[in-house]
């Protein structure tokens, strides 16, 4: 007590102790009050009052520093979160939580704009208990947040419910009321002068927010803006990297496809340069594409691989490919027209690869170009060879008996074995006098013989084809003296030439002299077809029936009789019956059953039964005008020929 009467030192020490201990503001006023109670003189009280005021200033400054230190620590922590975390939700949640903690508010939240909807929505909340509030959406200009977003300025209110500065709406007021909020502060998230969101802090009781608190919340909002911008940049970077990776993969795949296509093209070209044939190219292409390849000529006949099933040919697809200049789908197959300019040389068909990528499709189309080159090369060679062989054929047809051995040797040097059985086909256009038509027919004959060992040439008013037996359509299976081969040739030559072609076939023959005779027979046959009104068809002398006996060289009477009466002769020989004798008597008696039974000395029923058997063996048309004429001629020739 005595000390206070003479000095203020004890009071000053007490003030220092309060500063050191961080005592409350009220505790400083107690020092001056205690001094008055103890009766300190006026000068001492005045000194203590001044010291208390200075201590309170120091106390306030220290408290501000501590708060600033806490704020800076929070900001540093937030910056650390931004640097360490790639999770935008976690960073925004941490910013909102720190805003609530530093400002000491009941809740904090952050809204972001929805550009598609044209409003803002709650992105993150902390301390909120109302679902209605958490799902609020604010239009631009509505409520405190809408005004902040519209003006890009911070706004604070001690009591939002009664503040007339803001545009109140039923939805917003209902959400605020449900959450129980009173005092609200909102600051903009700015990026380049553009508002990208709003950060809020709010209390459930009236409160005035200081400028320092507004500044602190603005700083946190700046961090949130950085976080959003960083997240957007990262998303853009990831998207760019993904696009670059996709582009890189695409470039790598394209490069590999180009390299593969180039290697495939080089391989196919190398095959052509080494003299490979169409089947070799088809096999190599099938290996490259992993499918089945068929090469068809211009008429759809297979040059390699298997032909399409009847009625499923790729004619329409080939026309589409020719028009588009690219390969096209045909069901589960791919079709590519083989072209030389506007001329169609053939068709490539790929089966077993319904899904063809661009690289393999280009390779398939390149193979069409290579195939066209190969076919043109082979056709050019064939035309050259055919001209030389045509000279051989001309000499064979005009002077076969002059030097048969020399002709055979010449043929052997040209790859034609005249000693082997050949079928001679004589083809004529609609007008044999039309030289242009004969020239076109000769070209068609060259394409018809392409790939075979046959030869053809224009001779006289016709085009003559010499086809080895077993080639040229159905010749190998032909049991009618070449008639099937002649008909096949007539049909294909007509397609190739573009007009009807009539073809006559001589009998298969071997050796120059026999081949020349077969030519004469074929020539007579083709002219007989024209006389009979059967232009545009193909046939052999044997197929013409009794006319063949008249036209054929050597008049094969026995062959005609066997071909006509063979079933009856065999039946009589096997069973000991008299069907041939009964048929002869029937015709000799003018088709009268009564006169025939008298001639045969049998009952009329026996004649009827025998004629029924004849019908079974010869067919139902045996008694028709044309067939009965052939049967009567055969019966007469048999009688004249003897047993």
Image (cartoon, grey):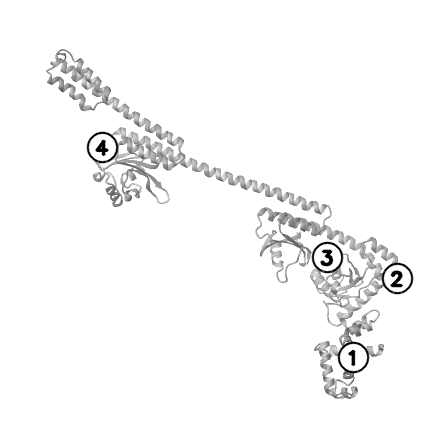
Residue at 61% from the left image edge and 47% from the top image edge: 362
**Badge number at residue 447:** 3
Residue furthest front as drawn? 575
User: Does label 1 or label 3 sit earlier along the sequence?
Assistant: 3
User: Does label 1 or label 2 sit earlier along the sequence?
Assistant: 2
What residue is pinned by disc 4? 208
**Badge number at residue 401:** 2
- How far apart are labels 1 and 3 at the CA level? 54 Å
Pick the quarter of the image with the N terminus: top left
Q: Is residue 376 left or right of residue 336?
A: right
What residue is pinned by disc 1? 576
Q: Is residue 546 left or right of residue 95?
A: right
Residue 623 visible from this viewpoint = no
Q: Position of residue 440 (x, y in %)?
A: 73, 59
Q: Position of residue 38 (x, y in %)?
A: 11, 16
Q: Nearer the viewer, mark 1 or mark 2?
A: 1
- How far apart are labels 3 and 2 at the CA level? 30 Å
Residue 156 visible from this viewpoint = yes
Crowding at dot 1, Cα within 10 Å, few <14 / some 14-19 / many 20+, comes out as: few
Crowding at dot 3, Cα within 10 Å, few <14 / some 14-19 / many 20+, comes out as: many
User: Does label 1 or label 4 sit earlier along the sequence?
Assistant: 4
């Amino acid at each position: 007590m005595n000390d206070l009467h003479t000095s203020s030192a004890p009071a000053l020490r007490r003030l220092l102790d309060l500063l050191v201990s961080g005592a409350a503001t009220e505790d400083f006023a107690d020092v001056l009050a205690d001094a008055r109670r103890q009766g300190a003189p006026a000068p001492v009280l005045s000194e203590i009052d001044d010291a208390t005021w200075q201590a309170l200033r120091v106390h306030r400054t220290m408290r501000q520093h501590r708060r600033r230190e806490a704020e800076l620590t929070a900001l540093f922590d937030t910056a650390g979160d931004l640097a360490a975390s790639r999770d935008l939700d976690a960073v925004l949640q941490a910013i909102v939580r720190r805003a609530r903690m530093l400002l000491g508010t009941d809740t904090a939240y952050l809204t972001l704009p929805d550009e598609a909807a044209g409003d803002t929505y709650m992105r993150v909340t902390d301390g909120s208990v109302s679902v209605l509030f958490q799902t609020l959406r604010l239009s631009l200009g509505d409520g405190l947040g809408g005004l902040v977003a519209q003006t890009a300025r911070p706004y604070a209110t001690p009591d939002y419910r009664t503040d007339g500065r803001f545009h109140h709406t039923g939805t917003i007021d209902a959400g605020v009321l449900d959450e129980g909020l009173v005092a609200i502060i909102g600051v903009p998230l700015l990026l380049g002068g553009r508002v990208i969101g709003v950060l809020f802090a709010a209390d459930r009781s009236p409160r005035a927010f200081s400028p320092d608190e507004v500044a602190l919340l603005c700083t946190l909002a700046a961090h949130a803006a950085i976080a959003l911008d960083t997240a957007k940049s990262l998303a853009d970077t990831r998207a760019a990297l993904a696009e670059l990776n996709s582009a890189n993969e695409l470039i790598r795949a394209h490069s590999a496809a180009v390299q593969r296509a180039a290697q495939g093209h080089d391989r196919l070209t190398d095959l052509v340069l080494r003299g490979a044939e169409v089947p070799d190219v088809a096999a190599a292409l099938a290996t490259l594409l992993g499918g089945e390849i068929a090469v068809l000529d211009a008429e759809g006949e297979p040059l390699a691989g298997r032909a399409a099933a009847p009625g499923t040919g790729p004619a329409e697809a080939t026309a589409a490919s020719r028009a588009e200049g690219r390969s096209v789908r045909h069901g589960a197959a791919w079709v590519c027209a083989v072209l030389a300019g506007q001329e169609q040389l053939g068709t490539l068909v790929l089966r077993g690869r319904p899904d063809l990528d661009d690289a393999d499709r280009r390779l398939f189309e390149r193979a069409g170009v290579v195939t066209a080159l190969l076919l043109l090369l082979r056709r050019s060679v064939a035309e050259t060879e055919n001209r030389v062989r045509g000279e051989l054929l001309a000499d064979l047809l005009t002077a076969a008996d002059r030097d048969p051995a020399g002709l055979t040797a010449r043929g052997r040097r040209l790859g034609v074995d005249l000693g082997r059985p050949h079928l001679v086909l004589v083809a004529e256009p609609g007008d044999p006098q039309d030289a242009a038509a004969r020239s076109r027919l000769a070209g068609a004959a060259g394409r018809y013989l392409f790939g075979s060992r046959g030869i053809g040439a224009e001779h006289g008013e016709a085009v003559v084809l010499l086809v080895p037996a077993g080639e040229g359509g159905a010749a190998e299976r032909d049991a009618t003296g070449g008639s099937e081969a002649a008909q096949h040739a007539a049909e294909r030559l007509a397609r190739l030439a573009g007009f009807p072609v009539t073809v006559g076939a001589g009998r298969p023959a071997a050796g120059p002299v026999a081949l020349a005779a077969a030519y004469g027979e074929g020539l007579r046959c083709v002219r007989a077809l024209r006389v009979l009104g059967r232009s545009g068809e193909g046939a052999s002398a044997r197929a013409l029936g009794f006319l063949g006996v008249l036209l054929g060289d050597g008049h094969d009477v026995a062959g005609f009789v066997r071909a006509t009466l063979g079933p009856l002769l065999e039946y009589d020989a096997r069973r000991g019956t008299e069907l041939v004798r009964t048929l002869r008597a029937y015709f000799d008696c003018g088709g009268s059953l009564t006169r025939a039974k008298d001639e045969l000395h049998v009952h009329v029923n026996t004649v009827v039964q025998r004629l029924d058997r004849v019908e079974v063996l010869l067919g139902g048309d045996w008694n028709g005008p044309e067939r009965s004429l052939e049967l009567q001629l055969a019966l007469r020739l048999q009688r004249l020929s003897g047993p």
